[in-house]
Image (cartoon, rainbow, N blue to C red):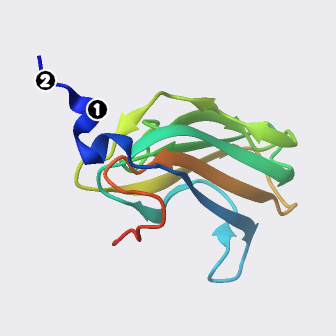
Amino acid sequence: MTDLRREGTMAQKKVECFFATELNEGTESFELALGNGNHEIANLPANILITDAYIHVKTAGDAATSSTFTLGTTSGGTQILSAANGKTLGDQGTFTGQSDTGSGKTLFLGVTKVGAETAIGKFVIVVEYLEYTKTSGEYTKF
């Protein structure tokens, strides 16, 4: 039997990391357009384990019937988060489950609105992950 406790990399300190960004709906080029769509919002690093995700609604939109957000690694996908309600304040969405990004993935935000919308929503998107090949203080290369 091999004693893996003696392997130096087994005891290296790890730190949980976060991708977080605030998005506002609106008409400016850097804002999330009102209405439906799939948007590339980030590049996730290679070799990470996604451990949690949610969308924090700061200001709810006013779509007449529904406002739903998803996070995925493909356009329109729900590999990370599904069913985030953009009409309810607070943390929203159902985390789909832990996943490994392999060689790296694009993070897509899916937006589905039903009914007319005029009010501008404000959202914070959070994806928590562990860089299992990195140690505390080591920089990530994208």
Tag 2 residue = 2
Where, by quadrant of the figure, is residue 99 drawn?
top left
Report helix, strand or loop for mark 1.
Answer: helix
Coordinates of residue 137 in the picture (x, y in percent): 48, 66
Viewed as shown, does residue 75 lie left or right of 22? left
- Horizontal placement of 141 versus 117: left or right? left
Q: 10 Å neighbourhood of mark 2: few (<14), some, or many (≥20)?
A: few
Work out which residue is located at the far left of the displayed protein and give it.
Answer: 1
In the rendered image, which quarter is residue 112 located in?
top right
Q: Does the image show residue 61?
A: no
Q: Which residue is at a point 80% across and 55% down the rendered structure image? A: 117
On the question of residue 122 being in view, the answer is: yes
Q: Nearer the viewer, residue 142 or 137?
A: 137
Residue at 65% from the left image edge and 68% from the top image edge: 33
Q: Is residue 67 left or right of residue 102?
A: right
Residue 51 horizontal/vertical position (percent): 51, 37
User: Vertical placement of 98 versus 59: above or below?
Assistant: above
Q: For the view shown, which residue lies furthest in the top direction?
A: 1
Q: Looking at the image, which residue is at 85% across and 39% down?
A: 88
Secondary structure beneath dot 2 equals loop
Q: Where is the C terminus found, in terms of image quarters?
A: bottom left
Q: Amino acid at mark 1?
A: Arg
Q: Is residue 31 placed above or below 78 in the rendered structure?
A: below
Which residue, given by chain and number where applicable, does mark 1 sit on? 5
The amino acid on which the numbered mark 2 sits, given as a three-letter code, is Thr
Residue placed most toward the observer, 67 or 15: 15
Image quadrant containing the N terminus: top left
Q: Where residue 62 appears, x then y in whole percent?
A: 86, 50
The Cα atoms of the two marked residues, 2 and 1, are separated by 9 Å
CB-based contact (under 8 Å), mark 2 and mark 1: no
Q: Which of these two is toward me, 126 or 34?
A: 126
In which image quadrant can residue 58 be found? bottom right
